[in-house]
Amino acid sequence: MIPGPVEVSPRVLSALGGPPPSHLAPDLIAAFGESLRRMRALWRAGEDSQPFLVAGGGTLAMEMAAVSSLAPGDAALVISSGYFSARFAEMLRRHGIGVRVVEAPVGEAPDLDRVVEALDGDGPFGALFATHVDTSTGVRVDPRPLAALARERGVLSVFDGVCATAAEPFEMEAWGADVYLTGSQKALGLPPGLALMVVSPRALEASAALPSPRPPLYLDWQAWLPIMKAYEEGRPSYFSTPATSLIPALAASLGEILDEGLEERWAAHARAARALGAAWDVLGLERVPVRPEITASTLSALYFPAGVDASLLARIRERGVIVAGGLHEAIRERYFRIGHMGYAVTRPEMLLATVEAVAGALAAGGRRDATEEAIAAAAGELGRASPGGGSA
Ligand SMILES: *Cc1c(COP(=O)(O)O)cnc(C)c1O
């Protein structure tokens, strides 16, 4: 239950078996094309948007977006809600882009008034970058007003959805966002290894118009564009070998989410977060995000209670559940993180086992044993009278 890699579903697991397919095999080409079309559906992106699917991490998707949308000498506005937003700023600076950061205190989301001030006072900016859910703080930023503010000013908007895509509501076309990117090992429920993003027509036009020298070849949307078009049209092509073993699993995972219903998936994440949140309240675990409206549904970032330290993680692990330590520099030693995204949110028994392990570990560390109350609180939110019954 770390914030990625996450548990994968049986359907995804079975799609992962078998010898590595050729990138030119008809089945692989079909799965690749189907994946691109399903990305558009899952991103709620327009028919004229362009999905990209490239071997690499979420960080690669971030870097492609940074260097394919802006040229050295341009300016960018980074809305920072934690560790991963800071990474965006670092990438942009390294590419010679002038960076203005609007930063929120730890646990807060950036203030929209300050974003407007920066957009109108410190620009002109070529693009705005924000992190939908920052995995270091568990803070969720609302992309909708940011995309609208950017569009009103002719600024591109780029959203890091690595800890959010397919879990938190996002409507790329309706909200007017230009880039939404993710990695395979988070809420999409696959092993690590794929960088995924969908790009709006105007962002693609901006990338086509970048001056020479072009961005680094592997990071240039324009270098990948013919390959994506070929796969979607069912034609073989080659630029750099795709992660062929992962593509059939991706098609399966996106298909599974769409079969279940994207909105049902969003609701399942919200329900899981409510259930776990009820348990954390019983256990007296304070959240890093300071308000419910900005608390992500995909992970819990929890302060250690008084008298408890990071040794708690080992006691949780002894109880069969793996959770993650702190990541944000300012509070690293004071909190821990529990991922709840992808397949796990559809499995009440996994969520309740997590509550049981955390509650048991706290009790083993000398705190009052509130395991039963915590499980009951979570089970109540999941619509289950008691653990072990039918699925919610
Ligand atoms: C995990 C994560 C990343 C980085 O993804 P990698 O696959 O580890 O490179 C970037 N942004 C966010 C919000 C993440 O959660």
Image (tube, grey):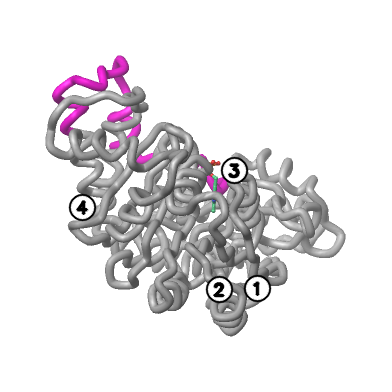
Q: Along the line of sight, which residue is nearer the eye, 74 or 112?
A: 74
Image location of residue 135, percent across then percent down = 59, 55
Residue 20 on the magenta segment: yes
Q: Amino acid at mark 4?
A: Asp
Q: Which residue is denoted by mark 1 in the rendering?
A: 108
Q: Amino acid at mark 1?
A: Glu
Task: Answer with left or right where residue 321 lies relative to residue 257.
Answer: right
User: Badges 2 and 3: C-beta atoms under 8 Å apart?
Assistant: no
Spatial separation of the CA atoms under disc 2 and disc 1: 8 Å
Question: Which comes before the other along the chain, label 1 or label 4?
Answer: 1
Q: Which residue is denoted by mark 4 in the rendering?
A: 259
Ligand 1 closer than 8 Å to the CB at disc 1?
A: no
Please tell me whether mark 4 sits on a helix, a strand or a loop: helix
Spatial separation of the CA atoms under disc 2 and disc 4: 28 Å
Q: Which residue is denoted by mark 3 in the rendering?
A: 321
Spatial separation of the CA atoms under disc 1 and disc 3: 28 Å
Question: Which comes before the other along the chain, label 1 or label 3?
Answer: 1
Region in magenta: 1-30
**Furthest residue toward front:** 212
